[in-house]
Amino acid sequence: MKVEHERPTRSLQPLSIPEWKWEHIAIDFVTGLPRTLGGNNIIWEIVDRLTKSAHFLPMKVNFSMDRLASLYVREIVRHGVPVSIVSDRDPRFTSRFWHSLQKALGTKLSFSTAFHPQTDGQSEMVIQVLEDLLRACTLDLKGNWDDYLPLVEFAYNNSFQASIRMTPFEGLYGRKCRSLVCLDDVGEMKLLGLELVQLTVEKVALIKERLKATQSRQKSYIDNRRQDLEFEVGDHVFLKVSPMKSVMRFGREEKLSPRFVGPFEILERVGTLAYKVALPPSLSKIHNVFHISTLRKYVTPQNLLQGHDDHFIPLAQRLKVETI
């Protein structure tokens, strides 16, 4: 099949806006980093979906699940046990241990569908910012990147976020961050208990309204550029193989690998925007639920010709002859 030039399918379905801070988080790993003297070579990125505040935790790629759980409790659960976690299908997040831990804590796990990392757009955007900040630090300051990670986290949390129209720090704590570059702007602020509670509630309400407005603008913009597409159980579809980095390419060189594979049968509709597909044993390691944007309907030669005899109209009947 040739490279497609079609508009994306179906309307945008944004994630629901969280009710409170650090109740709904997004997590991901930043990989491919140079090994530091301390042995760290990946970063665990955890983002609060409401305030956009984040923690960047240096790790070794071979961390055991026990150590990962300990780090999670120490750094994340101190904010309170999350209600939900959005992530990709990294083997660490789909493991039985991780599922058991989150079930015991009462946390719901939500995963992106195969070949559709846009589901977890929050993490993807933060990763881009994080990589830019790390690149600047290592180029300008030299040394190991994990030495500068606390400063990178501080810089990110104190940077303006367009979606909430304030910094993550201000969204989380209800006031601007006191730093060397803005001491005069912040000044000394003393609040009584009731005033602090009221200010915090007002900040959260303001953030939610701004996120709602941002989502509405994004949905309107994207929906105008999308097309409707639906499948029925039993239909056959091609699966679009993403050329994005770190996504399985079915054993071919990236530029020469197929853009679509299949056809595969639709087994079940999952929600409004995903379908379960019957994959062959050779693809058994791939999760078989796919976002609708990665599927294209397969039309058999029989379907292309079906009904031509029944609905054939002679040429003479299809032409309107006018006397000149």
Image (spheres, rainbow, N blue to C red):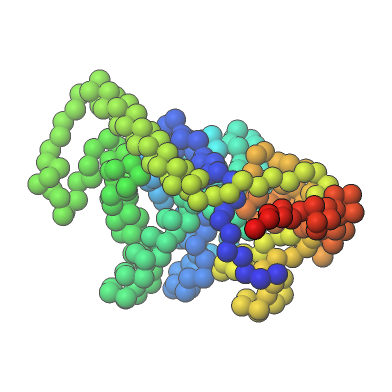
Nearer the observer, 39 or 165: 165
Q: 206 left or right of 72?
A: left
Identify the residue at image location x=25%, y=20%: 194
Identify the residue at image location x=50%, y=35%: 16
Q: Quadrant of the C terminus?
A: bottom right
Q: Quadrant of residue 264?
A: bottom right
- Residue 142 can be seen, yes or no: yes
Image location (x, y in percent) of residue 48: 43, 43
Q: Quadrant of the N terminus?
A: bottom right
Nearer the observer, 122 or 99: 122
Residue extending farthest to the front is 324
Q: 271 left or right of 304?
A: left
Nearer the observer, 26 or 14: 14
Is residue 6 positioned above or below 165 on the image?
below
Residue extending farthest to the left is 184
Identify the residue at image location x=82%, y=65%: 282
Is residue 288 positioned above or below 61 on the image?
above
Identify the residue at image location x=65%, y=50%: 291
Image location (x, y in percent) of residue 203: 30, 32
Image location (x, y in percent) of residue 239: 71, 60
Residue extending farthest to the right is 309
Q: How many marks?
A: 0
Q: 185 left or right of 166?
A: left
Residue extending farthest to the top is 194
Image location (x, y in percent) of residue 240: 67, 62
- Residue 249 can be seen, yes or no: no
